[in-house]
Amino acid sequence: MRRRIVQELRDIASVVVVRNGLLVFEHYRPGSDADTLRDVQSVTKSVVSALVGVALQENLLRDIEQPIAELLPEAAVLFQDARAGQVTLRHILGFTAGFEPESTMDRWARRLGGGGTLRRALGRPLVAAPGERFSYDNTTAYIASAALARAAKQSASKYAESHLFQPLGIARYEWPADSDGNNPPHAGLHLRTRDMAKLGQLFLDLGRWGERQLIPAPYAAAATSRQSAGGPPAQSWAYGYFWWVVPSGAARSPFLANGLGGQFIHVDPASRTVVAITADPSQASNARGHSLALLRSLLPTTIALS
């Protein structure tokens, strides 16, 4: 495997494979090592999903059926459509809120007179009823990070540090805040590859880490199970709550966190295998698909890749 990565799959920067809770393989591009922080791109969304689970476990969130307007009261003023009052945290986590995608957000930002990302995110009109349609959208994900921070009364990164990263033994990370003090959930987070694998192991074990239940087991199961059919940018995967789900006939389907360029945490419950991969975070690397090729060779019977 190492020879193939070096000779053929050159976009790959690091690989960690964990089987039955044991580290069985790791590889790092020359010039880096196990302690190098990696830009995980949209894998960050799955970290936010974990933080929502921690907040549920600690009763900071009532449940994921809470309306966004309860968690972010300013939403009631910013909503452009009465149906937006029905948008819940579950809709945000599953990308079924119905907001107009971010690609056409600029005109709505101008209409609202500028303002931060959260103000623009909440002020978009709806193009579908809540729960009706899947639409992968970074700005919708931002609402989840902001709602979590509001419930925790601290930034998502500070909450993660004390309530998720420390229990998992994650000592080093980077997750800068934006100008509004929020931590974007679609990019910016840097983690060690071994620590990415820890997140996969946590969800594989239904929220349990050692003797502690960090995340409610029902939420961990639901987050990594099919909640919708999904859609672009992954044509053949279903979607849970900030996790992609690979259709399969297994009792529990494989699931994965996915970031631009080939950043992956892939979990195969049947074989109790977690694979964390990082690669050059670029569109060119994304197009070449070296990380996907490696996943196919590692778990050919468990992953269907578009």
Image (tube, grey):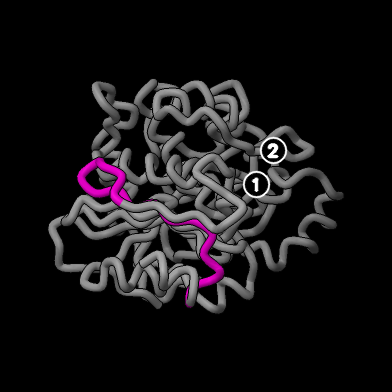
Secondary structure under the numbered disc 1 in the rendered image: loop
> Residue 191's quadrant in the figure?
top right
Disc 1 designates what residue? Answer: 188
**Viewport quadrant of the N terminus:** bottom left
Q: Main secondary structure of the magenta part?
A: strand
Drawn side of residue 170 relative to residue 120, left or right: left
Residue 73 drawn above or below residue 240: above
Residue 164 drawn above or below residue 134: above
Disc 2 designates what residue? Answer: 176
Drawn side of residue 153 relative to residue 249, left or right: right
Secondary structure under the numbered disc 2 in the rendered image: loop
**Tags 1 and 2 touching, CB below 8 Å:** yes
Question: Between 13 and 246, which is closer to the camera in this rendering?
Answer: 13
Drawn side of residue 87 relative to residue 201, left or right: right
Drawn side of residue 17 relative to residue 118, left or right: left
Earlier in the chain: of badge 1 and badge 2, it is 2
Disc 1 marks a residue whose amino acid type is: Gly
Disc 2 marks a residue whose amino acid type is: Pro
Image x and y of residue 259, in percent? 53, 59
- Residue beneath the point at 15% across and 67% down: 249
Residue 163 appears anywhere in the view: yes
Question: Between 90 and 81, which is closer to the camera in this rendering?
Answer: 90
Question: Between 32 and 181, which is closer to the camera in this rendering?
Answer: 32
Image x and y of residue 203, in percent? 31, 42
The crowding category of the residue bearing disc 2, from other C-alpha atoms within 10 Å (few below 14, some 14 to 19, many at least 20), is some
Q: Is residue 6 magenta?
A: no
Image x and y of residue 248, in percent? 21, 68
- From which residue to which does the magenta span run? 8-24
- Residue beneath the point at 43% across and 43% down: 194
Question: Between 193 and 152, which is closer to the camera in this rendering?
Answer: 193
